[in-house]
Amino acid sequence: MSAADVLTIGETMVMVTPQPGGRLDARSTFLLRPGGAESNVAASLAMLGHSAAWASAVGADPLGDLVVDTLRGHGVDVSLVRRDPRRPTAVYFKDPAPTGTSVYYYRTGSAASALSTGDLAAWAARHPRVTHLTGITPALSKPCHDLVRRLVHDRPLAPSLLSFDVNHRAALWPDGGGDELRALARASDVVFVGRDEAHTLWGTTTAESVRALLPEPPYLIVKDAEVEAVAFTPSGTYREPSCRVEVVDAVGAGDAFAAGWLSGLLDGLDEPERLRLGHRLAARVLRSPSDLAGLSPADRKGVGSHVADGRPRA
């Protein structure tokens, strides 16, 4: 197997969403699309021209075919996706409204919830430069929780750089998840977290207070919605204002931001440009009803040195 720039790991469901202007009701027609934080990052990176692989499990069903075929069509390497004949591909429904989009999940007992440390051997052969995880996966099941802890704390994919998006989903964490997500973030190399979710999880109020709580990651990126993103890095602290856009649907924007920042890291862009690229990709998704926006290698602003040794270059 060839090495990948980025390996993302986590569940992707089939998203059922009304055509633009519709609601989740009998009067609407619907689109079926893959929807998953980690595969969104992989697809965006692949469309930008990076080699991106996604590892997961889906059912041996038509919905699993839809997920795998669509992501392959975006250029994602899906050879590490396991097909499960006993468990289904999960589904979720989006209900857009002027006051915000509601999301309804049907994922209990899904194929991806059975991911475990037993899957690691197949993934290690890919030798990714960056491994990207989110805080969704450890909340899916005990085996998934054990898998993520192993990936983050034991680093079986070393020397891969470990990227972790907190991506807090309150419904998946009966105890709130604050302690576990903080432990995972502290052990990661790159951490993405929203200022609002950090406030919910840990009571922090500013980007600086998040950094005080998470001093260990070499790279901590705190996103403050429509205000700014702040990157705490070995070379200093950098702030970039968010793009002004008319929001159609916010779901997926955080994944696009992470993909943009990671693309900038892989291309050796400087710290401010990584943040700007993250903002530009997030703005594309904010203006779209889909979790993904059409991208091409031309959307990468500049090409520089790559991560050659699994560690970030400032």
Image: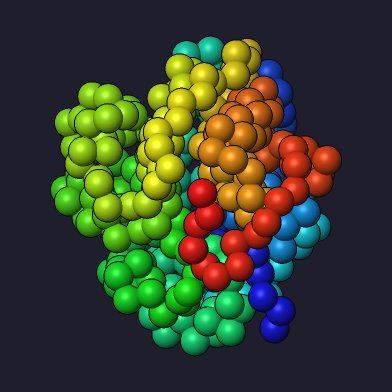
In the picture, measured across the screen, residue 136 lies left or right of residue 40, that is left
Residue at the outermost front position: 235
What residue lies at 20% left-to-right and 46% top-to-bottom? 178
What residue lies at 65% left-to-right and 29% top-to-bottom? 280
Query: Residue 226, percent across and down?
Result: 48, 18
In the picture, measured across the screen, residue 67 lies left or right of residue 310, that is right
Residue 284 visible in this rendered orientation of the protein: yes
Query: Which picture quadrant has residue 292?
Result: top right
Query: Residue 84, percent across and down?
Result: 55, 77
The colour scheme used here is: rainbow
Whether 104 is drawn above or below 18: the answer is below
Query: Along the line of sight, which residue is nearer the eye, 279 or 180?
Result: 279
Whether 192 is drawn above or below 118: the answer is above
Query: Which picture quadrant has residue 169?
Result: top left
Whether 57 is drawn above or below 91: the answer is below
Query: Along the line of sight, which residue is nearer the eye, 240 or 254?
Result: 240
Query: Residue 19, percent across and down?
Result: 71, 28
The image shows a total of numbered marks equal to 0
Query: Residue 72, percent across and down?
Result: 76, 62
Question: Where's the N terminus, which quadrant?
Answer: bottom right
In the picture, measured across the screen, residue 8 lies left or right of residue 3, that is left
Residue 143 visible in this rendered orientation of the protein: no
What residue lies at 66% left-to-right and 69% top-to-bottom? 4
What residue lies at 32% left-to-right and 76% top-to-bottom? 154
Query: Along the line of sight, which residue is nearer the eye, 268 or 191?
Result: 268
